[in-house]
Image (cartoon, grey):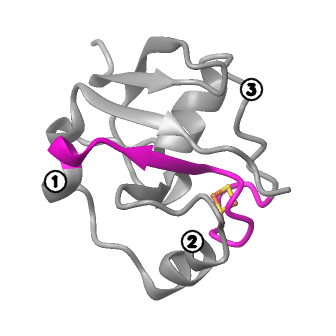
Amino acid sequence: MTEATIQLHVVDLAGETRTIDGAIGTSLMEIIRSSGIDDIPAYCGGCCSCASCHVHVDADFAAVLPPMSQDEDDLLDGSEHRAAGSRLSCQIPASAALSGIRLTIAPQQE
Ligand code: FES
C-alpha cells in the first residue's frame, strides 16, 4: 500500500521554488527538511520553542490551516519577518486539505 502524500511548493531562501512530496500527518517542517532543503534549522526539533521553522504561507491556503496556538503566535511576534501568512511549519501537520500548498521560507532572525 502506498503511503498517502501531498505535494508542497516551497520557495527557498535563494528564491527557488521546489516541489516536494510529504506524508500526511508529518509536519511541514519535517517534510521540508527531509526533502533536502536545508534552510530550516529547526533547532528545537519541532516543539514550538525556537521559531527557526518560520514560513510564509500563501493567502490561498489561510482558510485551511490549523488554528495558531498562543505559543506559536507569541514566538512569531518576536520575528522581524512576521507577515500576514506567517506560521511555524512544525505546527502544521500535512493534511489532504493542504495539497498543493505554496509557502516561502522566512529568513532566519539575525
Ligand atoms: S522547529 Fe522550533 S519552533 Fe518549529
**Which secondary structure type mostly characterizes the magenta part of the structure?**
loop
Tell me where residue 4 appears, x and y as whole percent. 27, 24
Q: What element does badge 1 sit on? A: helix
- Numbered disc in front, either 1 or 2: 2
- Numbered disc in front, either 3 or 2: 2
Whether 60 is among the magenta residues is yes
Q: Is mark 2 within 8 Å of ligand 1?
A: no
Query: Label 1: which residue?
Result: 64
Q: CA distance from mark 1 to mark 2?
A: 19 Å
| Other-residue count near label 3 (Cα within 10 Å), few / some / many at <14 / 14–19 / ≥20 | few
Q: Quadrant of ligand 1?
A: bottom right
**Label 3 sits on what residue type?**
Asp
Q: Is mark 3 within 8 Å of ligand 1?
A: no
The answer to whether residue 54 is left or right of residue 20 is right
Q: CA distance from mark 3 to mark 2?
A: 20 Å
91 to 23, vertically: above or below: below
Give the numbered dot on residue 76.
2
Tell me where residue 98 appears, x and y as whole percent. 23, 39
Q: Residue most toward the right?
A: 110
Whether 102 is among the magenta residues is no
**Label 2 sits on what residue type?**
Leu
**Which residue shows up at 58% across the image and 38% down it?**
30
- Which mark is first along the chain, 3 or 1? 3
Query: Label 3: which residue?
Result: 38
Which contiguous range is marked in magenta?
A: 44-61
The quarter of the picture where residue 26 lies is top left
**Label 1 sits on what residue type?**
Val
Q: What element does badge 2 sit on? A: helix
**Which residue shows up at 72% across the image and 31% down it?**
39
Give the numbered dot on residue 18.
none
